[in-house]
Image (spheres, rainbow, N blue to C red):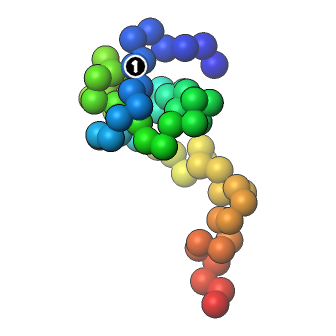
Amino acid sequence: MSQPKDANPRNLAGGRNVQCPHYVFCLDIAAANMWPQFTCDYCFYRKTRQDTRIEELDLCSPGWEDIWGGSG
């Protein structure tokens, strides 16, 4: 995935736009830099919205069954 123009995550507490089509890219930046938090407040795309489709969610990620499996 190429870097979106004007994407600008910052290592600060603040709002996040999880419906932004570039959110995963910014999350990767935060993880690569080991930021404990990040904000979308200074980003050009901060108000961009994209509907999330259930097919796009990674339902096979580790721990999914623990959260939603109802065991216990």
**Left or right side of 23 for 42:** left
- The image position of residue 26, as x and y in percent, is 50, 28
Q: Place residue 32 in its image quadrant.
A: top right
Nearest to the observer: residue 26 or residue 65: 26
Figure quadrant of the C terminus = bottom right
> Residue reaching furthest top?
5
Residue drawn where x is 60% and y is 13% of the image? 2
Q: Count the numbered circles shown.
A: 1
Residue type beneath disc 1: Asn
Q: Is residue 20 left or right of residue 70?
A: left
Residue in the picture at 65% in, 86% down: 71
- Dividing the picture into quadrants, the one containing residue 44 is top left
Is 51 in front, or is 32?
A: 32
- Taking the spot 39% from the left edge, 27% from the top edge, the residue there is 10
Q: Residue 35: where, in percent of width, then height?
A: 50, 37
The vertical placement of 2 against 50, above or below, is: above
Residue under circle 1?
8
Instruction: State the quadrant of the N terminus.
Output: top right
